[in-house]
C-alpha cells in the first residue's frame, strides 16, 4: 500500500460498505464532464480569527515586515467549501456557525444559485450528522424543500476516509495560500478568501487525481473476495 494511504487504511474498517462507498466516489471522479449532472465536493472547516497583540512593524528599505509572536484570539468561524473537480470551480462560504440550518442554506444555494440549470447535482460529502437532505425541511417550506432535494444526489465517503473528498485538497491549498496569516474578523476573512477564489477559478485550477477504481482494486486486493 502506498505510504500516504497506509495510515488511512489502519484507521478505517475496510469492509464491503467501505469498498462500495469508495468505488462510488471514484467512479464519479472518473466520469466525463456533464454540466447537467455535475459532481460537487462539499465539506466544512473551522477557522480561528486572530488579531495582533502589538501593531506589526511595516516594511522598510532592506527589511521585511515584522510581526510579534503574541496574538489575540478573536473567536472562531466556519468555512463551507464547494468544489467541482471536472470544471475547476470552487466556492468558499464564511459563516458564524456550522448548524444543520446552515447546511440547508448551502444546499439551497448550490441548487438555486450555483447550478440552476443542472438536472441532478451529485454531491460528495462525509458522514457528519448534519449532512442530510431532511435538514431542508427544517428550514424551508415543504414545496421548496422537496424541489431542492429532488435535484440533489448524495454520495458519502467511507467512514474515516474523508481524504476521498477532493474539497479537502482545496482546503489545504486555501490554508497554505490564503489563511497562513492573522485575519482579524469575518469581513476581512471573506474579502481575502473571495480574492483567492476568484483567481483560482479564473485559472480553472483542477486536482490531478490519479486514484482510479481500477487502482483501488489493485491496492486493496486483499479486501475483495477472490471468487
Image: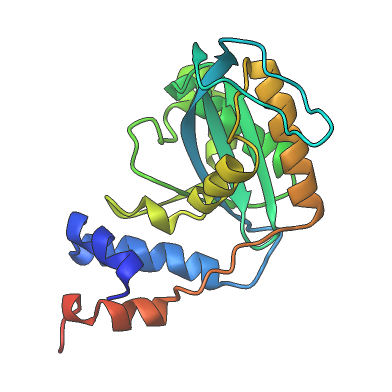
Quarter of the image with the C terminus in it: bottom left
User: Is 79 positioned to the left or the right of 35 in the image?
Assistant: left
Depth check: give the residue in front, 167 or 193: 193
The residue that appears at 72% across and 42% down in the rendered structure is 197
The residue that appears at 34% across and 36% down in the rendered structure is 128
Q: Is residue 32 above or below residue 79?
A: below
Image spot of residue 31 (x, y percent): 57, 72
Which quadrant of the structure image shows residue 111?
Answer: top right
Image spot of residue 48 (x, y percent): 49, 22
| Coloring scheme used | rainbow
Furthest residue toward front: 62
User: Is 198 positioned to the left or the right of 89 in the image?
Assistant: right
Q: Is residue 178 above or below residue 123?
A: above
Task: Look at the image and tell me whether residue 22 can be seen.
Answer: yes
Task: Look at the image and tell me whether residue 75 can be seen.
Answer: no
The residue that appears at 77% across and 36% down in the rendered structure is 195
Quarter of the image with the N terminus in it: bottom left
The residue that appears at 55% across and 18% down in the rendered structure is 50
Depth check: give the residue in front, 131 or 167: 167
Image spot of residue 10 (x, y percent): 18, 60
Q: Is residue 159 above or below residue 197?
A: below
User: Is 158 positioned to the left or the right of 149 in the image?
Assistant: left
Q: How many marks?
A: 0
User: Is 44 positioned to the left or the right of 225 in the image?
Assistant: right
Amino acid at each position: 500500500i502506498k505510504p500516504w494511504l497506509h495510515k488511512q487504511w489502519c484507521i478505517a474498517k475496510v469492509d464491503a460498505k467501505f469498498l462500495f462507498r469508495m468505488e462510488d466516489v471514484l467512479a464519479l471522479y472518473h466520469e466525463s464532464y456533464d454540466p447537467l449532472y455535475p459532481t460537487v465536493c462539499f465539506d466544512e472547516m473551522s477557522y480561528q480569527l486572530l488579531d495582533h497583540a502589538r501593531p506589526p512593524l511595516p516594511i522598510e528599505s532592506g527589511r521585511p515586515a515584522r510581526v510579534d509572536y503574541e496574538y489575540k484570539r478573536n473567536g472562531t468561524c466556519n468555512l463551507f467549501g464547494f468544489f467541482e473537480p471536472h470544471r475547476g470551480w470552487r466556492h468558499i462560504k464564511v459563516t458564524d456557525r456550522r448548524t444543520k440550518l446552515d447546511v440547508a442554506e448551502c444546499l439551497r444555494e448550490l441548487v438555486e444559485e450555483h447550478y440552476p440549470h443542472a438536472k441532478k447535482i451529485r454531491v460528495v460529502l462525509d458522514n457528519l450528522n448534519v449532512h442530510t437532505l431532511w435538514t431542508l425541511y427544517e428550514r424551508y417550506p415543504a414545496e421548496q424543500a422537496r424541489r431542492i432535494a429532488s435535484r440533489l444526489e448524495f454520495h458519502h465517503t467511507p467512514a474515516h476516509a474523508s481524504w476521498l473528498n477532493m474539497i479537502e485538497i482545496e482546503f489545504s491549498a486555501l490554508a497554505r495560500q490564503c489563511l497562513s496569516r492573522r485575519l482579524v474578523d469575518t469581513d476581512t476573512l471573506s474579502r481575502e478568501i473571495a480574492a483567492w477564489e476568484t483567481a483560482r477559478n479564473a485559472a480553472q485550477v483542477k486536482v490531478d487525481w490519479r486514484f482510479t477504481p481500477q487502482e483501488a482494486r489493485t491496492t486493496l486486493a486483499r479486501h475483495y473476495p477472490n471468487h
